Amino acid sequence: MKKKRIGGLALSLVLAAGTLLGGCGQGQKAGEKKDNFTVAMVTDVGGIDDKSFNQSAWEGLQKFGEENGMKKGKDGYDYLQSQSDADYSTNLNKLARSNFDLIYGIGFLMTDAITKIAEQKPKQKFAIVDSVVDKPNVASITFKEHEGSFLVGVVAGLTTKTNKIGFVGGMEIPLIEKFESGFRAGVKAVNPKATVEVQYAGAFDQADKGKAIASSMYASGIDVIYHAAGATGNGVFSEAKDLKTKDPNRELWVIGVDKDQAPEGEVKVGDKTYNVTLTSMVKRVDVAVYDVAKKTKEGQFPGGKVLEYGLPENGVGIAPTQDNIKPDILKVVDEWKQKIINGEVKVPTTRDEYKQFEANLK
Amino acid sequence: MSSNRVTNFLVPVFAVLLGMIAGSIVMLVSGYDPIAGYSALVYGAFGDSYYIGETIRQATPYILAGLAVAFAFRTGLFNIGVEGQLIVGWLAAVWVGVSFDLPKIIHLPLAILAAAAAGALWAFIPGFLKARFKVHEVIITIMMNYIALHVSNAVIRSVLSDKGFKSAKVHASASLQSEFLQSITDYSTLHYGIIVALIGAVVMWFLLEKTTKGYELRAVGFNQHASQYAGMNVPRNIILAMVISGAFAGVAGAMEGLGTFGNISVKAGFTGVGFDGIAVALLGSNNAFGIILSAFLFGALKVGALEMPSSADVPTELVDIVIALIIFFVASSYLIRLLLSRFQKEGK
């Protein structure tokens, strides 16, 4: 009896789905030929509106698409958003099956997925941002985040009044360690008395955790926080703005990351508008994404190569919005920037290198 | 009896249909084409061999998570901790997978058993607290989820890797991945885990329906006091039920660790599989066979939804809403059924 019932249930489920959906045919023709260049990207769980890393990549792709008269969609430029790490492979596969000429995996977390699919589809061109995949059909895009972080570290070290500075990281992975180490080195280089408190939220997409950490940091007397935490960092901004609303005279700052985050820091108290964004460490993912797409379109796909975007290439640096930084601080920043470009200063990329750096300062 | 049969058969179907209708209203109101949306969903789940492979792969942990929730349910317990038990199972499976070199015939079962044992241990704690001190299992299992998440992250960082964010890949002798299955599904991530999941369903059915112990467990679920009066050891049965439930959840984690991913990486949040398992179990009426069907439905929704933004231009957020609506109606089907059965009892 029971089995019959369940069998009937299964059958009716299938039938119901069939009648409802069967009629609508599918227009996807895999393997269809096309002449125009197409490009797409897969975001990590942050999504294209994370006001940070993924958004920057998508802006680069949009710029490339608009300049070349492409349309958003399967015949032009497109993106797929991942809801969990199980989606990376599926999304990359989906794009490869739609015959995009170049497919970006945005983010360190996609390393395994790109490695695997690059083996499976050796003719498909891929690019990965923030990681190195040693395959002839993958272009690896990396940034010298430690150099940019060093410069904002200099700004933080010279701006702080309490000599207490905070760093909020997303996940504790080697990539974010580069931000942390460069930043701490920058602070120490100009202000040996200042201490940097480091905390990791454990996620790139949880603004509530960012807010909680920022709240305890500001309460402990920290007056400048640098976040390298993607969308989690939005919580740092909202906490700083809340505190600024309560007490507009209190001096507290956030240093943004990846994009120029000045718009995130704007807060209106009464008639006056304040901005809690001191500056931002921009990582021009958009420049790199645009650059690689352009090269690929011109037939110069940098497959198998590791492209490093640093200070000289304008791949990293201080955001153009610098209204809150005092002019004499900017001068110091420029001096350090030249020293890094000339190779006089080697910015640490790991905690061990940072310890070395700190020991050499003394 | 016959009206009961009709109800059982119609309610889930209507629930899914209602969910889809509500979803299409949302899509229409927001200015998107529901027909294009749903055809993208179906194409993305069953459109060709690749998508079918992905759907089966996604259904695999759902089956086991559903079994875990259902097993506890049938014995009167609400195991919200499937998510945490799944994570520790995943961790244990990968741990065994990377640290031993054994012939496949020993290594693979050992890794799966380790996952089951880890899940069982994680569920033993709330089971014991419930049996001994009457602490409600819902609270303990929820808290155990967080402990599982952060403990496993710490273990991955300090033991399974050198301060990295992921473990090494499990050895081939412990892997469920199959080049054969991948090649017939055009390089999907399909793996042999589906066989394990189906065996799990048979085991659950056999345990509950065909053994004396299963009868005892169900009896405790129906009425603790009556069972005690009949001479059954209620606390021991509660612990046993949680342990078996946790073992199923642990094996679900092994499917991810030995099959889909082949390793474990630091997690920013929950996988969601354990929580979806609650809905899978409800839709499947806590019945082993029903769970297989509902796990496939959930797998198809999850995998098919990824196609909606790219070929039907439905934004990801809206896709989430549509899927949630379907799940909502599916979950409320349980309520509908509950109400109907009350109604019928009173009528008699």
Image: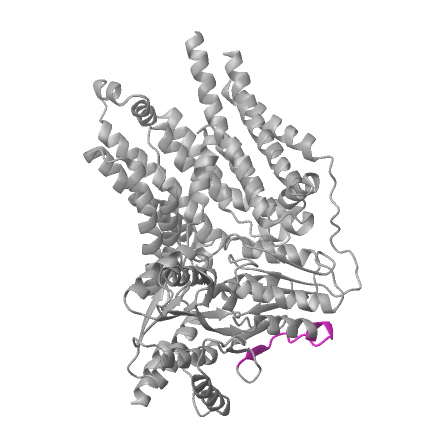
Placement of the C terminus of chain B among the 4 image quadrants? top left
Relative depth, front residue between A24 and B29: B29
Residue B340 in percent (x, y) is at 47, 17
**Residue B300, quarter of the rendered image:** top right
Residue B316 in percent (x, y) is at 59, 49
- Does A178 sit left or right of B194 as displayed? left
Residue A280 in percent (x, y) is at 48, 73
Relative depth, front residue between B166 and B312: B312
At horizontal 36% and vertical 85% (from top left) the residue drawn is A190
- Does A275 sit left or right of B41 as displayed? left
Q: How is the image coloured?
A: one colour
**Residue A77, quarter of the rendered image:** bottom right
Asked if residue A74 is positioned above or below residue B335 in the image, the reply reads below
The tally of labels here is: 0
Residue A108 in percent (x, y) is at 50, 66
Asked if residue B81 is positioned above or below residue B154 in the image, the reply reads above
Farthest residue to the top: give it: B348
Farthest residue to the front: give it: A271
Relative depth, front residue between A210 and B245: A210
Q: Is residue B319 magenta?
A: no
Asked if residue B332 is positioned above or below residue A38 in the image, the reply reads above
Q: Is residue A302 magenta?
A: yes
Magenta span: A295-310
Farthest residue to the left: give it: B133
Using the rendered image of the protein, determine whether residue A358 is visible from the camera's viewpoint: yes
Using the rendered image of the protein, determine whether residue B289 is visible from the camera's viewpoint: no
